[in-house]
Amino acid sequence: MVVELVDLSAFGPHLLSPSPSPDVEVALELVKEADVIVVASPTYKGTYTGLLKAFLDRLPSQALAGTVALPLLVMGDARHALAVEVHLRPLLVELGAVVPTPGLALVEADLPRLPEVLEQWHTAVAPQVRAALTDAAKA
């Protein structure tokens, strides 16, 4: 298994530029070619960041068809927990991704326990992710 990281903070100025950026194009190809993606963002004003939106807006319709996506939002307050399901999940589905599990709404206060929180999430979602990948391989 190869794990690639696309850190959008390096692309900020290029995402709103009218001319294509080679680095952004490479990142978009990585995302389009992945079997599984974890789409993570801090949440501001109850949704994902504009940086993430600007990046995902560069993907064509159905660019994530056949990709299993796992949404994750980090938030300051648990009152924003629904944002992962109400805002980020529909965006990924719109792009064609299969989102077989509930997203992870991670409260900043839980960041010191991140390995434990991620292990619990992994244990809960791994069977659904495996099933979705098996279904995608059959299609």
Image (cartoon, rainbow, N blue to C red):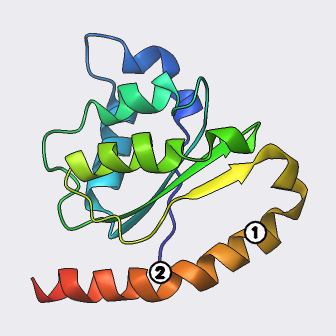
Kindly identify the residue that appears in the image at 20 percent across and 68 percent down: 66
Q: Residue at x 35, y 53 (%)?
A: 30
Label drawn at residue 1: 2
Q: Which quadrant of the figure has residue 21?
A: top left
- Mark 1 is on which residue type? Val
**In the orientation shown, which residue stands out farthest toward the top?**
18
Is disc 1 placed on a helix, strand or loop? helix
Q: Quadrant of the C terminus?
A: bottom left
Q: Is residue 86 left or right of residue 112?
A: left
Q: Nearer the viewer, mark 1 or mark 2?
A: 1
User: What residue would you read off at disc 1?
Assistant: 117
In the rendering, which numbered label is found on residue 72? none
Earlier residue among tags 1 and 2: 2
Q: Secondary structure at mark 2?
A: loop
> Is residue 52 depicted above or below 109 in this figure?
above
Residue occupying image coordinates x 36% and y 71% = 100
Q: Nearer the viewer, residue 62 or 93?
A: 93
Q: Is residue 95 placed above or below 70 in the rendered structure? A: above
Task: Give me the C-alpha separation between circle 1 and circle 2.
Answer: 22 Å
Q: Give the x, y percent position of residue 39.
A: 48, 51
Left or right of 30, for residue 95: left
Residue 59 sits above or below residue 109 on the image: above
What residue lies at 21% left-to-right and 86% top-to-bottom? 135
- Can residue 6 be seen by looking at this rendering? no
**Residue 7 spot, x, y in % from top left:** 56, 41
Which percent across, then down, holds residue 15?
39, 21
Dot 1 alpha-carbon crowd within 10 angstroms: few under 14, some 14 to 19, many 20 or more: some
